[in-house]
Amino acid sequence: MKGIVKILGIVVGLFVVIVIAAVIALPMFINPNDFKQEITDAIKEDTGRELTIKDDIGFSVFPWLGVELGAVQLSNAKGFGDKPFVKVSKADVKIKLLPLLRKEVEMETVVLQGLELQLMKDKSGRSNWADLTKPDKEQKEEDHGAGPGTGASTVAALAIGGLDIRDARIVWDDRSTNTRQTIDNLNINTGELSFGLPVDVDISFDIESTQPAMRGNFTLLGKMAIDLASQLHSFNNMQLIANVSGKDIPNSALALKLAGDISTDLASQIVQLKNLQLKLDDTRVTGALAMKRFDNPAYQFNLVVDSVDVDRYTAASNANTKKAAASPVHSAAAGATQLPVETLRKLNANGKLVIKEMKASGVRSQDINIELKAGNGNIALYPLSAKMYDGTYKGNIRIDAQKSVPVISMDEKMTGIQVGKMLLDFAGKETLTGNANIHVKLSAQGKTTDDIRKNLNGNASFALKDGKLNGVNNVKEIMNTLSILTGGTPSSDTSNETVFSSFTGSMKFVNGVGHNNDLLLDSPTLKLTGAGKLDLVKEWVSYKAEATLSKDLKTENIKIKELDKILGKPIPVNIDCSLKAINASCFKYSLEEIIKQEIENKIKDQIFKKLVKPKTPAPTEPVAAEQPAQEPTADPKKQLEQDLKKKLLEGLFR
């Protein structure tokens, strides 16, 4: 913007030169058109460029000393093509004659129509205006030689009736970065310009850009006051209206209205925006902003947001992004895959943000309060608080960006959260329901979300009550497994959930893997205990647990053999599956050992009864004649055991 203003100053100065040349000629000659060639020659000698004045120069003497120009153009620098650097279809400048005698300049409205300005850089970075500007060193020496206040006092005597710039076009074509921006239909209208006094400003233009890929229109209105002597400037009743669209615009389109009062103190290097009213699509923001120091800015803010849908602006970036924790702060940052490390190191800010309602990564929260303190590479988001899903959130998040790899630490608590509603919004399904208390105290280092996940360390705990584990009915699955082993009838229960009264556990995270040794799910019909790990890097859960069916489980309507033999006894359960697909198939129940033990116990009981049964005396028979020798028979005890096993197994698996 500074460069464009500078170039516009050069263009205006060019026409001032023409005006002055014409004015000087007027007292001595009747027709300044006779001296077009002298004017163009002077420009050629000074800049090396061709100035073309196509139409006649109109002029007046009293009471206004004025010049009116038709079509005028200045050629481009060598190597930038034949298209003119700048051209104007009409320019009209008038200066009041009598105030000149008092060394005051009073101008009528300056009219500039059909301005076309081509600003270009070639592939090497050379610009097409470099030959028109003085080197920075020479300019600084000139400014220093002018003395303090000289420019301000000289210009302060200038009064302009206004600016009327119509249908202007400015093209920025940077071939070193392959970017192009075009400002079209630029119109600037002002009231009377007098330094230190407010003036009405009305600016509008269309814009089209390749990077970012977008197009739109802007309107800027307000009262501007510039006081060069005191270096105090203001832009009150400011209104900025913008409508933009394009593939690089969040949600492909946005509508913005910004209003407020801007004041600038150049001597103290302070910029303030008060009475801020921002409307971005359906979101409204009010409050105030301030910035101190231009080279190393320090920001202050106090903002209130009524309602914001963060997903509306991050949907494209989140399409291939893994979702993380669902607290308000984490959800709002879910679209970022890499930390802006350099920005964080330089950030100097202090302020408060209140968001009445927010949706981010699907998660909804209310009455969000965020306090930010940042400086010297240390960022603190504390205190943090919010209401969500009938519960509360409190957090303390800190980032140490001083080191080569940032370190993040978080201490967050969710109390009384209806976790099912949150998961439904966050992941699209209620994998787990219940009233949850969750506490995480973790730290990690990394520049990307993947690195942070791999280096996550610390502790976490959870406690849920009166909920359900959806997608698996542990009692039904145990019964069905038993029916397969014993030949009974499968469970008629059609539900696909495990209801619990409490579900608790704690984890110690080491490099992104959470280790848990105290998992406990308790319900009237089932108790599940176990140990395992939660791998956030591979997004995988692996557990070895034991499920125990309650001895009070009602079994009168369940036709499954041997069911009563497993009640109250721990059943091994293996859980091994992706976090993205936890369902009944993830739970593997090992009932074989229990059934085998029951069979062996029955066999032993039958053998014992057979052995202790009283023997009936054998009848007396006559002595038979001697028979040929026979092979020895099997041990009766072993034979009996084998026969019993065979009969029992036939009965169990019939």
Image (cartoon, helix red, strand yellow):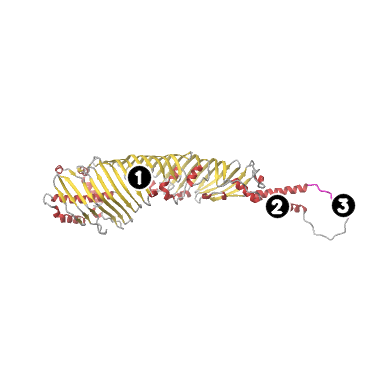
- Give the quadrant of residue 380: top left
Tell me the tag on residue 341.
none
What is the crowding at mark 3: few (fewer than 14 residues within 10 Å), some, or many (at least 20)?
Answer: few
Circles 1 and 2 in contact, beta carbons < 8 Å: no
Q: Would you say residue 619 sits in the magenta stretch?
A: yes
The residue carrying mark 3 is: 620
Look at the numbered disc 3 and give the secondary structure of its residue. Answer: loop
Q: Nearer the viewer, mark 3 or mark 1?
A: 1
Where's residue 609, x and y in %? 76, 47
Mark with earlier residue (3, 1) = 1
> Which is nearer the eye, 201 or 403?
201
The residue tagged with tag 1: helix, strand or loop?
Answer: strand
Q: Which residue is mark 1?
A: 256
Q: Nearer the viewer, residue 64 or 102?
A: 64
Q: Amino acid at mark 1?
A: Leu
Would you say the magenta stretch is mainly helix, strand or loop?
Answer: loop
User: Percent position (x, y) of residue 127?
Assistant: 28, 55
Question: Which sits earlier in the primary sequence, circle 3 or circle 2?
Answer: 3
The disc labelled 2 sits on which kind of residue? Answer: Glu
- Across and down, in percent, residue 623 comes to 88, 56
| Circle 2: element type | helix
Residue with the most extreme bottom position: 628
Left/right placement of residue 381 relative to residue 543 reads left
Find the magenta span and give its range: 613-622
Disc sitting over residue 650 in the figure: 2
27 sits to left or right of 383: left
